[in-house]
Structures are given as structure tokens and as C-alpha cells.
Amino acid sequence: MASEYAGIDNASTEKAIAPWLSIVGIGENGLAGLGEDARRAIETAEFVFGGKRHLALAADAIKGEASPWPVPFDVEMADVVTLRGRKVCVLASGDPFFYGVGVTLLRQVSAEETVSYPAPSAFSLAASRLGWALQDVECISLHGRSIDLIRPHLHSGAKLIVLTSDEKAPALLAALVSETGFGASDFSLLEALGGPREKVRTGNAAKFSLSDVDPLNVVAIDVVADEKARIIPYSQGLDDALFEHDGQMTKREIRAVTLSSLGPRHGELLWDIGAGSGSIGIEWMLAHPSLRAIGIEQHPERAERAMRNAEAFGVPGLEIVIGTVPGAFEGLPTPDAIFIGGGGSEAGVLDGAIAALKPGGRLVANAVTLEMEATLLAAQARLGGSLIRLEVARASAVGSMQGWRPAMPVTQWAWVKP
């Protein structure tokens, strides 16, 4: 039987640029930890780039021109890219493609132009020192990123290995872990792994008091929760009490259905119109690290509250735009999905959202007022989509007994743009 690949034209392969860029992962043991091919890549390079520490570790093998990274770091990698076709070597920490410079480089050059020689990452070294199965560990980089990103991972029984930015980060991390109810967690500080300065110290998060911390460190946390720990569940429709709010928020049962209707998909961007407490955008981003959200809120005090909630839930990347719609739409990146939770009956809001949504995108709008419901009924008659009516009743005290108190019903319109 003929191969299904028989008809592929190899012209594009023949035209590919020959590899000119070597990416070498180097550990704290320097040249001693490199294989022959990796060492040869350094020795034969006309130009060698890396951090000052990396260049010092490889100094005995560098024959070409050594250049430390510029400050501030150039994410466009212009100094490297301009040398395309020359023999260039870039030094990186450990595995260049695990939160490393290799990822940044390949945004500018193709994989076919490179040869990579990875070394063990800090995560791998930490797991090996502790005897942890790496596949069962959450590996998190806080290097140059907000410490709040740790929050969604704090679940009793979880094992976390966290790459930090400097010598101050472990104490800040221990404080956050303790303040949120996980102070009983085992807290290991692993410094300068793989080199002569390597040190591993383990204690209790709540009792962390080390001051002589090496700037090159990772923290490993075996998470233990106390009775009042702030645990962010994996489910949608989080408890309203976890949010700071003024009463103007999509309640948990309606929020769960709303997130289901929005249907987050990898890498997508949500506009949350009338963001309020930010609950929809926050839960959207919690569904997967690749998801992004922009909340649009006209009241500054609510916008500030939404940002505080985003930090408390470990999604500090939630963007909040203060302004009235549809004017606030101007200049925003095109959304894959839009939620309208407030202000949708105002002139131009729904039509502006429909125009802004990319083809194939989803729009979900909730109504509690008759005016907004009329707007949604008209939109469904004109454009199609689905309408559902959601009613929730909660048990509450009636004298010495209990009875059902119904919440305001919610009409939801969900529509996919052709």
C-alpha cells in the first residue's frame, strides 16, 4: 500500500536554513556537567550570549565574543537575530525550554535553525533531591512574576516546586502560604542546586526565618491545610463568600451555568462587560493558565475590588478597563467570547459587543431586569441563539423553621457569531 506521505513536496525542507544557533543548558557545575557536543558548541561559536553567571561558568570554553544579556532584557532578541547565519551559542539555565530563554528565542527563529542541548532543570534537580515523582508535582515559575500565582495550587496533599526570583522570595512565599491557612506545610529551600554551593533546608512554612538565602533558589512545598485554609476549588461556581463584593455580582449557581455557556477553550480571550467583582473573568482564567480576560467596569471602586479579587484568587493577569460601554471597547484586542452581566440594555452596548466579537465567538448575556430581558428577547428573535430562564431558591429562617426564598430569576441568552 502506498504511503499517505508519498505526495509531500520536499522543496520547503530543502530551502530550510541550516542550523546556526546552539542553545546550551548549563548547570551550577559548569562545564563539568556538559556533554561533548554541548561543550563543542560553545568552543566553536563566534558569538556566545548568556547571563553573566552563565558566561562565567563557561568561560574556559568560550573562544568567541562573549556578550551578557542587555539590561533590561530584550525579548525580541535583536542582538542574536541580527547574527543569523553565523555560529552563535546561547547559554541558558538548565532546560532552556522549561520556563527558559529557549522559548523566547523560538519566537524569533525557527526550530530548524537551532540545535539544543538541555541540562536538568531546577525542577528536576529539586524533585531528585526530595525523592518526589516529578509527574505528580506542580512546577511553577514565579521568576519575574506575581507571587499570587501560587494561590490556586494550594490544596492539601499537593506537592509544589516553585522557581523564585531572588533571596527575598522564599520568605514572602512562606508568609503568603501561612496567611492563607497552609502554615503547617513542609517548606523546603533548595539553593544553588547542582553546584558547590548546593544546600537543602527543610522546615515549616509558618516558622520560616532564614535570612542567609542564596539568590539562586527554588522552594518545594508539601501542602498541608488547616481548618480555615482558603482553598480555591477546581470547580466552577465558587462560593460567593470567597469574593469581596458589594452584592453586585453573578451568584455562584448562575455563575456556574454562565461559565458552562461561555465554554472556555485554550488560549482564548474573554471580555467581561460590567465586571463588578470580577467573578466571571476570574473563574474563566482559573479554568486554564492559557486563558485571558478583560473586565470592563464603569465604577472605579468596583474595578479596584475586582483587581483585589483577582490577586486573591491567583490570577493577577486579569485586566480591568475603567469606562462606559460601548466607548470602552475601542482599542481592545478582539475577544473570543463576551459576557454581558450589566449595562446590556443601554444604547449600543449589545450591538457593539456583537460587532467586536470574532466570527465563531460566543456571546452570553444575563438579564435580571425587564428592560434587559426585552433586549435579549429581541436579539434572539433577530439573530437566533438559545434562551434559558434560571431560578434559584435558598432555604432560610422563617421564624423557628425554614422556608424557600427565591432569588430574582435570570434570563440568559447564548449565541455563536456566524
Image (cartoon, helix red, strand yellow):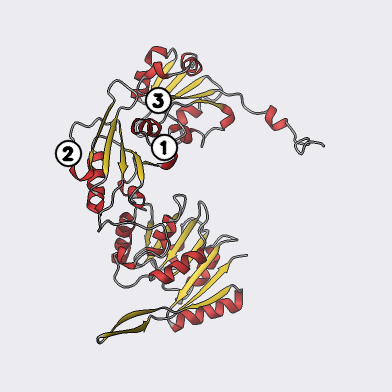
Judge whether 339 appears above or below 50 on screen. below
Choose between 177 and 310: the one closer to the eye. Answer: 177
Question: Residue lying farthest bottom?
Answer: 399
Q: Secondary structure at mark 1?
A: loop
State the residue position of label 3.
50
- Quadrant assignment for the N terminus: top right
Relative placement, left or right, of 2 versus 43 is right
Judge whether 146 appears above or below 85 on screen. below
Q: Which mark is in front, 1 or 2?
A: 1
- Among the 4 quarters of the image, the one containing residue 85: top right
Residues packed near mark 2 inside 10 Å, few (<14), some (14 to 19) or many (20 plus): few
State the residue position of label 1.
133
Q: Secondary structure at mark 3?
A: strand
For the residues marked 1 and 3, what is the alpha-carbon distance in whole angstroms?
A: 31 Å
Q: Which sits earlier in the primary sequence, circle 1 or circle 3? A: 3
Across and down, in percent, residue 198 comes to 29, 25
Q: Which mark is in front, 3 or 2?
A: 2
Across and down, in percent, residue 218 comes to 31, 35
- Among the 4 quarters of the image, the one containing residue 298: bottom left
Choose between 216 and 67: the one closer to the eye. Answer: 216
- Tell me which amino acid carries mark 1: Ala
- Quadrant assignment for the C terminus: bottom right
Q: Which sits earlier in the primary sequence, circle 1 or circle 2? A: 1
Judge whether 78 appears above or below 20 on screen. below
State the residue position of label 2.
209
Q: Are marks 1 and 2 in contact (CB under 8 Å)?
A: no
- Tell me which amino acid carries mark 3: Gly
